[in-house]
Amino acid sequence: SIRSNEIVAQPYTPAVIHAGGAHLRPAQPLSVDLEKWIEDSGEHGFILFSMGTVVKPSEMPDRALRAILNVLGTLKQRVLWKWDQDTMDNLPSNIRLTKWLTQQDILGHKKLRFFITHGGIASTQEAAYHGCPVISIPVSFDQFMNADQVQNQGWGQTIYWDNFTEELLREAIEDILNSDRMRNIARQQSVVLRDQQRSPQENVNFWLEYVLRHNGAVHLRSPLLRMPWYRLFNVDVWLCLIVIVVLLMTLLVYLTYHIIKKIWRLITRSWKLKSE
């Protein structure tokens, strides 16, 4: 079994190999046109806004879209927005739309201030690898868990669609821009992810070859896989405990009955003696 990067310590069997993040790589140079647009942002830098490949941003609720434009359009930073259409009505001058982008090359740019994302596992890993703070707006599935994990670790904020407001987005942006706390934590995440004996790609290759060399590496499999179902679910243990409890209860009832019977005989005998 192959898991993603081990950011939060959890117990695993030897057959589980942390080999996620094989797609992670250092940032490459951007196109001349995009690089010039970013450099023209000056000291304020720019923001990346991408909701992945599944979610179509043009289909988001009008209320949310207006709130986003009202906030992003007033920022000093430029905004690079992955948008699924060619144009957008009432587009602020500091926002640039693009249908496609090389996300890791942008996440690794020195002028990037933070990343607004849906919280998908790939985007979250890439943001962590490049040390970029995030504002997560999860939509479905594992995105909620990823967003909560990032927020709990301190290098991002989470805003949910059911209570999305202009004020919440503005507060989250100001919190990241006006403090180095999240950026420092994000950079530390990057250091941890990069500090490995082998790269994720090398790790995957090693363990694939290892399994082939050892005919499936059966010795790494958990004994639970060979355990009978009644032992796996502790049925034998529970049956033993139930038998013990039943025996104790039976003994207790038996003793109680005979003690009460003995006491009753003594009482009745005393009454007979008094009556005589």
Image: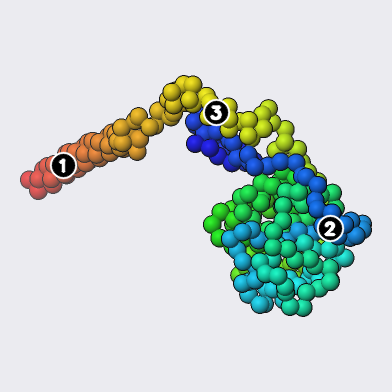
> Which numbered marker is on residue 207?
3
Amino acid type, label 3 = Trp
| Residue hosting label 1 | 261
| Residue hosting label 2 | 33
Amino acid type, label 2 = Asp
* Front one among 150 and 249: 150
Can you give x and y, in whole percent of width and height, for residue 75 in the image? 84, 67
Mark 1 element type: helix
Amino acid type, label 1 = Lys
**What residue is drawn where x is 64% and y is 42%?**
23
Q: Is residue 98 left or right of residue 211?
A: right
Q: Is residue 15 left or right of residue 106?
A: left
The alpha-carbon separation of the residues under discs 3 and 2 comes to 42 Å
Q: Quadrant of the C terminus?
A: top left
The alpha-carbon separation of the residues under discs 1 and 2 comes to 100 Å
**What residue is drawn where x is 61% and y is 50%?**
121
